Image: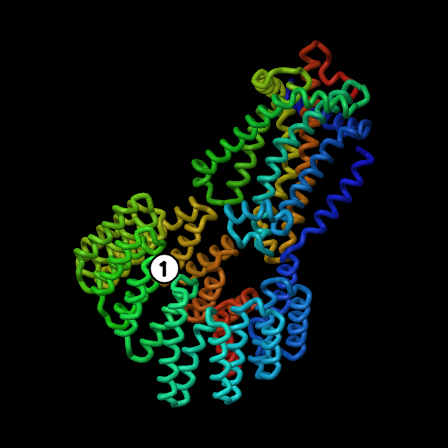
Amino acid sequence: MNMFKRIFSAIRIAGGVLRLWWEQPVILTPFLVLMVCHALVLCVLFLAPRPPISSVLAPVIRAFAGEQFLHYPENFLLLPRLFTYGKNISDFFVGVFFTCVAITLIHQGYQKTTASWWFGVKKAVRRFPRALVIWGCTFGAAVLVVRLTSRYIGPLIPSVTARIMAEFSLSILVQMIFVFALPSVIIENRKAFAALRRSLQVLGGRPIETILLVALPSLAFIPVIYGSMHVPQLMQRFFPEVTLYVLAGRIFIGGMVDLSIVSGVTLLFLAHKDSENGQPVLAPEAVQ
Amino acid sequence: VKRGMPGALIGALLFFGGCGGDYPAEKAYWHYARQYAAVLAHPAAADVKSFAGAVQGLRDIIARYQAWPRAVELQITLAHFFAVRGDRDAAEQELRKVLVTFPEYREQCAQAQFMIATLAEQRGDMLAAAAAAASVMETYPATLAGLQAPVYIIDLYKRNGMKSDAAVAAAKALRQYDNLIAMNPYGVVVPQALEYMSAVYVNQQRPADALQALKAFAGKYPKSPAAVPALLAQVRIQSDILKSYDTAAMICTQIIRDYPAHAVTRSLYITAGDLYVRCRQFDTARRTYAAAAERYPKDSVLQAAVQMAVAASYDSAGDGERARLEYSAVVNRYPLSAQALQVPLVLASHYRQAGDTENMQKTLDAALVQYRLIITNTARQPRAADALELTASVYMIQKKHAEAIAALAEFRRRFPADMRAAGILLKTGVIYEEALNDAVNARACYQEFLQRYPSHALAGTARERLHQLLRAENQSI
């Protein structure tokens, strides 16, 4: 396939995603639940300096960050870092599960059957351990690449913004390598490492479409990164609570980006699978 | 799920809404402090409307959050507001509220009672002042203000030319301190009591008695938390007053030997070594430094400090060549230490003193390259902030004032929350004013400083400089 056909194919997939959301809005609900979970994490961390939550979290914050971060307005300086940790933990336990549910719902929608939450939950529970392994591999690889980059390549890049953007781009690249593994586990019931191999295979067959479907939605995250980088300045210029707006934006944009990537990638995976089975590429009704 | 969701949401909202503690009080005070920053920084100069608003705001916070531990401090601040505006009666009234409303805060009550004494003195009623101060010690003996009060009374008598009364007060103060220490030699206020006691002795020109009392305490109660402070007080008297550096160094060595696990022991090696250097016992000094390095091989901060101290000891001994070698060792072995960053400036000053301008410039240029590397490699870490500050210092030595200002601006841009950011802004203004004769930019810096950091310790300096600039401008007009 030449470049234009691939780009056109990615556009058709994106169109298919929008149609699928319109026809089966239930697909959006796992991500909504995930956003609510992240919002709850943010609420708990925001209220960490206050009793009764402080009885659990204050000793931890005091030990690792210092007493001053339990008081207004310094607590807002620590909040983004705490939220990153909280979000990672919630992603590990809740995020992976609901992503599995979402993939099942998208699969059902693609097959033109009514998307059923209960079916998705049952499937997600059964395949959750494998999904966790894949999430762990993706997260570990992304952290490793970012750490190595900041250690060895970072010093060569004088601008801090440019360095952060480089790290962000690399983390997207890592994500692309593993992005088809979860659909492979859920849809094809593969073992974790077989799914990782399968992900590489699909990526090799559809590189341009994958780049477009993963990188383009991820660009929406750039304002969030920029905002997170400048939290102290924003606090000084406006008011300390501006941190909450930045983090709320991060939850919303992060949720939308996840929704777009998971939907697009799952549809691309299904289309690729169909083409492997001899059916015309992007044949199913869902993307037509 | 549909039925349970609203209930869960309402439950979560109620739970989150019920979280309280001191946080709302902190928030209310922060916003208050932001709104009335100018009044808080300079209550005497505030206009009547702003002052009334600030007072009312403070009263509201105190009334609303009375259980907040800082409420009592705010009540004292309120009294301070009135006191600096000369309204002593209102100030005293606010202070008496502290005694009535917050009796459980003994430290603050003692402070309030002490302030009542100073207000009486300002009114010219010396006897009332002495009586109020005496009651501080009697009512709140184990508080900081209670310990300060006797010293205040002695000073009050002295200032009014009543030397015999001062001597009587001193004798009484010493007795009170003795009693307090004897009552509970392991108490938390004993270190301060010893400190004030030795201050009274020194004030009475009796340093030998101070030394004897401190020595007796350390010998009698070696396990008291005040034993090491008592020995350290002896070090200070020996070195600062009696100029007996070798004795001071020996006391340091005694502390190191007898209290090896004490928090001050590590730094005492350096102090002892420095004292030996001052009495020109360079070999003993270096042996002391070496002992520290040997005892704490994993403490890289101490190791760097030791290496720097060794270099400085050669410097003091007049062995410039060896000193330079040792300074180089600081840079080579501990390149990211605070001491390593200082070395180029020390070496440059050596070259300047020797009239070697060429080597001075080379050293400073190399330092700039080193600092830039650190700034790039350590990004947002504190060491990068150190390097930026030193970069500005190097440019200042090189008389490249514009570059120095750019480095300082970069510091403020990268580290706006750093404690030094305020000082850096003031420094920028001073460079504009003194080195570049740029009154407009200097004024802008001072104004920004006062706007951003109204209650900073350097706010007075900034205000004074701004007033001078404005006066000069008015005169020229």
Residue drawn 26% across the image and 68% down it: B239
Residue indicated by mark 1 = B224
At mark 1, the secondary structure is loop
Q: Residue at x 43, y 84 (%)?
A: B156
Residues A195 and B429: in front is: A195
Q: Which of these two is toward me, A122 or A164? A: A122
- Placement of the N terminus of chain A among the 4 image quadrants: top right
Q: Is residue A284 above or below residue A68?
A: above
Q: Tell which of B212 and A276 is nearer to you.
A: B212
The answer to whether residue B335 is seen in the rendering is: yes
Q: Quadrant of the C terminus of chain A?
A: top right
Say which amino acid is labelled 1.
Answer: Ser
x%, y% of residue B284?
A: 18, 56
For residue B183, side relative to residue B117 (left or right): left
Counting from the top left corner in percent of width and height, residue B232 is at 31, 63
Relative image position of residue A152 (x, y in whole percent): 43, 36
Q: Nearer the viewer, residue B185 or B161?
A: B185
